[in-house]
Structure formats: C-alpha cells, structure tokens
Image (tube, rainbow, N blue to C red):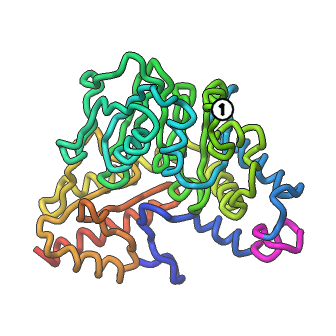
Amino acid sequence: MRISDTSRVFNFSAGPSALPFDVLEQIRSELLDWQGTGMSVMEVSHRGAEFLELAKRCEANVRELLSIPDGYSVLFLQGGATLQMSMVPMNLAAAGDVVDYVVTGIWSKKAVAEAQKFCTANVIASSADQDFSEIPDPASWVRSDDAAYLHYTPNETIAGVEFHYIPESGVPLVADMSSTIFSRPIDISKFGVIYAGAQKNIGPAGLTLVIVRDDLLELAPKNLPHLMTWRAYAESGSMTNTPPTFAWYVADLVLQWLMRQGGLDAIAVINERKAGKLYDAIDVSDFYSNPVRKDCRSWMNVAFILADSSLDAKFLAESKAAGLTNLKGHRSVGGMRASIYNAVPEAAVDALLAFMSEFEKNNR
C-alpha cells in the first residue's frame, strides 16, 4: 500500500499534516539554490526583492482562490491559531464589551477561555452535553443584544464536527478556519475576520493566515502592544518583524499547486467524494461507527470507533505496517481519526478502505 516504490506512506495526521508530493519535490530541488540566488530560501532576506515578490504572489493567490472582495487585508503571521484566539478579543473588544461564542468542540472551547480574559464572553450555544457530536440549531442560540462579534469554529478536528453553512450574524462574524480553509469555496464577504493555522491545508506549521475586514483594523485599543495589533501587520505587509520565511515559501508553493488542481471548486468535489467514501463504508458496517450526526460530519476529519475497542492497538499497528499512518484518534476521545486534507490523495482513502475491510474480515 505504500506510494509506488518509495518509502513514503499515506499520512492521515490532523496536523502538521500531509503536504502535496509535487511541492515536496520542488522544495528538495531548489533547497540549496532558490531562484538562482545561490542561497536557500531560508537564507535570503525577507526584505530582498526575491522574497518580496514571493510574498506579493502568495497574497495574490490567496485573494484569487478565495475570491476575497475589496476592503479586506490578508496577513501572514506567527503564533498559530491559538494566538489568534487572544488577538481576536484584544483587537475587536474593550474590557467592558460582550462577545458571543458558539462552542462545538475543544478548539472553540479554548477560544472562549481566552476571550474571557479580556471581556465578557457569552457561550450562546454549546453541544458539550451531546459530547460535541452535533451543532446546535441556530434557532436555539441565545444571542447577546450588544455583542461586539460572534465567533465560531467551522470545523472541529477532534470529534470531526463541521458547519456546512455560514451562520447569519448581525455583528462581525469571526471564524477559526484552521482545518477547513481552502477545502471549498466560501463567501468571504460574510465574515469580519477569518484566521487559520497553516499546518492543515496551507503549508507547514509556523505560519498563520488572517483575513480581516479593513474597518475592523481600527478597533484595537491604543494601548495594545504593537505586535498584537492586526493593523501593524496590515501596514507593514506582514513584515513588522522577521516573518517565518520558509513556512511562507512552502505556503506559496502549496497555493500554486492548489490552483493547478483547478482551484477550490475542483478540490471541493474531490474532498466531498473522499469523505463520502469513508462515511459510506463506516455506516454500512457494524464493526465501525461514527458518532457525529450526519448533517454535521466533517469533510476533513473522519473519526470512527471500533465496536471492540480492545482491537484498537492491533488496528493501529497493522495499519501503520501497511503504510497508513497517524490514524490514532485524539487522546480526549480515543478511537480512530483519518484527516483527509487537500494534500491527502484519493488513493490514500481507497487504501484505507481496503485495509479497513480486510481488518474487519480478519477480526470478527
């Protein structure tokens, strides 16, 4: 089941996750001499002409792929999505403000905890009492009348729960899209802020993408540290300090690869098909199961459990030997999880399905 005759495996890691094979080959080919500079991209100045051109191209590709309308800034930051959980309330709310959060998993729960350090964060809906296996009906959300913004996490990687719609919001809508951005088209105009760690569908860990509506840049309190304001990065082209140049370079290559695949319309068809194959196989089996309500299932993170949990260790050992890696579920929920981001080929899903069928047959 390994990829052709190489030592490469099919990597189902939730993050850092798989990168396109073509991109890895290109990185290897130009690692020592990038664009004829005689240096690695890791050695060139981030303010040099060559890297500034890369940064310009990368931003242009983000804008084209996501069809970002005028009036939004695209920022390339550090600190991961976790830092943005703090920067969101710091930039959008004052100490006495109220902000609204929808909690559908561990990551949105963490975001609330950070917001509570800076302002009054209301949990207006939560699926915690359903073990984060569904998304609360928007009609049941108890929204605040004076919220500064509404925050949600479109895809929760741990349980594999996903919004397949954009919530209506009369206030700036903020989304942690770390594990769903670039997996399909989205209407950016409905959002005030989108943030995403790179290590799922953008590139390697170390880079964070932030898309923020320009009018919101002016809301940051004047006493906020310079590097904690989005405005600072918008004004400097994300060059306020030395950026993670290698991660940015790889992200540029990944976005070019994505455009060669046909963009987000094309990748969405593939992603939906990959997830559908897995869920269909799980649903017809009494050996495997998925606890997430069907209309809330993630395209990116397919969680499943074995009817006999004593077989978990054997499943993981044998799947790894077959070249299918990182299938262990998150420690908080157990079971298995196949993360099938853009760079995970459909052949990987087919190989996993063949293994699951054979394992079920041999272990009944």
Magenta-span inclusion, residue 37:
yes
Q: Is residue 69 visible from the viewing direction of this image?
A: no
- Identify whether 78 is placed above or below 164: below
- Residue 186 position within the rendered picture, expressed as x and y whole percent measured from the top left: 52, 34
As rendered, which of 183 and 16 lies closer to the eye? 16
**Tag 1 residue:** 222
Magenta-span inclusion, residue 160:
no
Q: State the image quarter where residue 22 is shown.
A: bottom right
As rendered, which of 185 and 124 lies closer to the eye? 124
In the image, the segment drawn in magenta is: 30-42
- Residue 38 position within the rendered picture, expressed as x and y whole percent measured from the top left: 88, 74
- Identify whether 180 is placed above or below 174: below
Q: Is residue 292 visible from the viewing direction of this image?
A: yes
- Residue 306 position within the rendered picture, expressed as x and y whole percent measured from the top left: 17, 65
- Residue 256 position within the rendered picture, expressed as x and y whole percent measured from the top left: 68, 53
Q: Main secondary structure of the magenta part?
A: loop
Q: Is residue 159 left or right of residue 68?
A: left
Instruction: Give the residue type that dot 1 points to.
Output: Lys
At a point 60% along the width and 42% down the height, the residue shown is 210
At a point 80% along the width and 70% down the height, the residue shown is 43
As rendered, which of 3 and 93 lies closer to the eye? 93
Q: Residue furthest front?
A: 223
At a point 84% along the width and 73% down the height, the residue shown is 39
- Identify whether 135 is placed above or below 147: below
Q: Secondary structure at mark 1?
A: loop
As rendered, which of 241 and 257 lies closer to the eye? 241
Q: State the image quarter where residue 293 is shown.
A: top left
The quadrant in which the N terminus is found is: bottom left
- Identify whether 264 is placed above or below 247: above
The quadrant in which the C terminus is found is: bottom left
* Mark 1 closeness class: few <14, some 14–19, many ≥20 residues within 10 Å: few
Q: State the image quarter where residue 101 is shown.
A: top left
